[in-house]
């Protein structure tokens, strides 16, 4: 009997160690410092953004345009131009170079201004009061995004929030967020800036 009890105790200890190791594997620390902060970079134009293109002393070529779902805009003389994924300055240079083939001025003055930011869009789902798709027109953090969704409801698990983020290769990464530690000020560096296309799920 004693041998049986001793054997069972040994088995339970081994099982406990195995479960502990498995749990530790699941809770592998996430490197939040590698996540980008778009506030420190030039704005990239995206689908649905509205822009104003001005060609100095040439009103016929100056226009406002909304970037279409295929990422392009259409301009007089130049036809379709890819705009999504470029900064306003990069688009300006692109338009300027193509205009040199059509107008007399060898160095046309072109400006590109963003009139409305509509491509910055993200989704909040799960246990919040008013989930859905949001287009705030400015960069927001995870805490601000949840506030825009009305905050966490009483069924929410604030320690297990996930940001689903798709990178340039199409791979989706799951970023764990602990609302409580951010709100308490313990982990302010985890209050990531939301990127276009992010999906925030609150279990």
Image (spheres, helix red, strand yellow):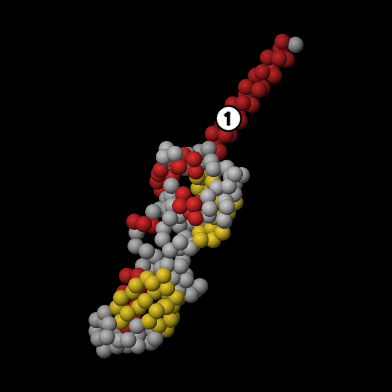
Give the residue at x 61% y 30%. Answer: 19
In the foreground, 156 or 161: 156
Residue 116 image point, x, y percent: 41, 70
Q: How many marks?
A: 1
Q: Is residue 164 visible?
A: no
Q: Is residue 144 left or right of residue 26?
A: left
- The residue pinned by badge 1 equals 20
Q: Quadrant of the N terminus?
A: top right
**Left or right relative to 86: residue 174:** right
- Could you tell me residue 150's position as x and y percent? 53, 53
User: Where residue 58 sits in the image (x, y, percent)?
Assistant: 30, 86
Q: Nearer the viewer, residue 33 or 22?
A: 33
Q: Dot 1, crowdedness within 10 Å: few (<14), some or many (≥20)?
A: few
Quarter of image, res 158: top right
Q: Is residue 47 above or below residue 8?
A: below
Compared to residue 34, the image places residue 50 above or below, namely: below
Say whether residue 83 is left or right of residue 107.
Answer: right
Q: Which residue is at the far left?
A: 106
Q: Which residue is found at the position 57% from the left and 51% from the top?
A: 128
Q: Residue furthest right?
A: 1
């Amino acid at each position: 009997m004693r041998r049986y009890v001793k054997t069972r105790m040994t088995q339970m200890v081994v099982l406990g160690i195995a479960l502990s190791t498995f749990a530790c594997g699941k809770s592998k620390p996430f490197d939040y410092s590698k996540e980008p902060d778009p506030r420190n970079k030039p704005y990239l134009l995206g689908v649905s953004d509205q822009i104003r293109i001005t060609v100095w002393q040439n009103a016929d070529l100056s226009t406002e345009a909304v970037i279409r779902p295929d990422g392009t805009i259409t301009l007089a003389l130049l036809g379709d131009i890819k705009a999504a994924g470029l900064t306003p300055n990069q688009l300006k240079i692109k338009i300027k170079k193509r205009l040199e083939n059509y107008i007399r001025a060898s160095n046309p003055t072109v400006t590109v201004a963003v009139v409305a930011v509509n491509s910055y869009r993200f989704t909040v789902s799960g246990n919040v009061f008013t989930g859905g798709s949001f287009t705030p027109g400015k960069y927001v953090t995870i805490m601000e995004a949840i506030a825009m969704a009305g905050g966490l409801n009483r069924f929410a698990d604030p320690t297990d929030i996930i940001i689903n983020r798709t990178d340039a290769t199409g791979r989706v990464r799951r970023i764990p967020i602990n609302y409580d530690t951010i709100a308490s000020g313990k982990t302010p560096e985890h209050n990531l800036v939301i990127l276009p296309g992010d999906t925030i799920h609150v279990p």
